Amino acid sequence: MIIVTSNRTPEERIQEIVAVIEKEGLQVHISRGKDRTIIGLIGSIEPKLAEHLRQMKDIENVIKISKSYKLASRDFHPENTVITIGDVKIGGGDLVVMGGPCAVESPAQIDEIASLVKAAGGQVLRGGAFKPRTGPYSFQGIGVEGLAMMAEAGKKYGLLTITEVMTPEYVDVCAEYADILQVGTRNMQNFDLLRKLGDSGKPVLLKRGFSATYDEFLNAAEYILAGGNPNVMLCERGIRTFETYTRNTLDLAAIPVLHSLSHLPVIADPSHGTGRRELVEPMTKASVAAGADGLIIEMHTDPDNSMTGDGVQSLFPEQFAALLRDLEKLSPLVGKRFDTPKLIQHG
């Protein structure tokens, strides 16, 4: 349920209303927009309390939210959430690009790739230290050592870093090294992990499960939000369909749909969404046109010899740089801002 008041309502009065709600054992979340202040209620609400609130002074409306997710709902939080990490804002008017390899392989590898991501105009360095693989004998990542390598490369080149966390036990150590924690498609409904991330407060990029509905996806985000962590990004990374030509089917409709249902930033992953290098560029541009707030793109200096075997979907550095130059031209057409370094742009 949400309570709507005018922004002209004094703060003291807002707190008086909040006190009435909390006295009934309910949780309260306040969202201040341009014209209205929304007070969200979490918990079981008796009809008698709802009617009492409806009649209180300064309350313009009391609206019941029928969705199973509350905190992730745009009804609950009408204004777009903007996540600020250092000087990078995710969810505002800026387009954010996360680039790098599927996995950290060595200090030299991640250092070189970090320099190329920075030179091309990327703001975030991606790389996995723990890799959930379909086969038990596949390369599983190099662990905490890889986290340290990526953190050092990010710091050296002024990039934020993002890495995948697989279990609740590794949240703290990953949070120590990385700026953003990623939840992979296989862990979207790992509820113990989501609860732990809710406690961490660290920015989280939540990937959609490859068979998840929008409702299931947003309910997964709700676990993190309900734990007290408002810094959640939703990532459309492709879903499983009957088509076998591509690795997954990138659901472009998810981007505007999620924006309509939720206030959380939406990131697109055209690399996993297609699994084919030649499709990454057009689907990246299509994602931006559809309204994506950011992109996470695989790039490798030697894709053919990638340790994870995901080289077929990784861009070469020159392809990555050319794509980002194109995004600089495309972004203003869809109301976004993205700049590449001028030396790269005109070189």
Image: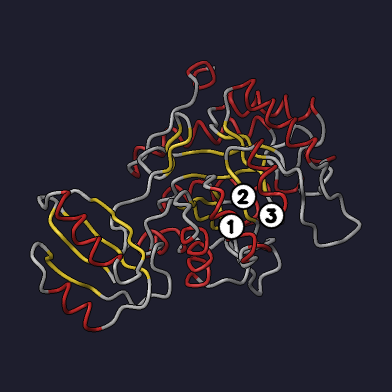
Kindly identify which residue carries mark 1: 207
Q: Which structural element holds mark 1?
A: strand
- Which is more N-terminal, label 2 or label 1? 2
Direction from residue 303 to residue 277 in the image, left or right: left
Q: Which residue appears at 72% of the width and 49% of the height?
A: 170
Outermost residue, front side: 23
Check if mark 1's residue and mark 2's residue have beta carbons within 8 Å: yes
Q: Left or right: 106 with respect to 226? A: right
Quote the CA–CA distance across marks 1 and 2: 7 Å
Q: Amino acid at mark 2?
A: Gln
Tell me where residue 64 appears, x and y as whole percent: 27, 76
142 on left or right of 313:
right
Q: Quadrant of residue 183?
A: bottom right
Circle 3 SS class: loop
- The residue nearer to you, when weighing 118 against 318, is 118
Q: Which residue is mark 2?
A: 182
Density class for disc 2 (Cα within 10 Å; few <14, some 14-19, many ≥20) is: many
Q: Work out whether mark 2 precedes mark 3 in sequence or the reverse, and give the earlier one.
A: 2
Which mark's residue is nearer the viewer, 1 or 2? 2
Label 3 neighbour load within 10 Å: few <14, some 14-19, many 20+: many
Q: Nearer the viewer, mark 2 or mark 3?
A: 2
Task: Residue type at mark 3: give it.
Answer: Gly
Name which residue lies at 40% across and 39% down. Answer: 331
Question: Which mark lies nearer to you, 1 or 3?
Answer: 1
Quadrant of the image containing the N terminus: bottom left
Please tell me in which quadrant of the rendered image residue 117 appears. top right
In percent of width and height, residue 272 lies at 65, 54
Image coordinates of residue 303 in percent, x first then y, are 78, 39
Residue hosting label 3: 275
Location of residue 291 with respect to 215 vertically, above or below: above
Q: CA distance from mark 1 to mark 3?
A: 16 Å
Outermost residue toward the right?
Answer: 137
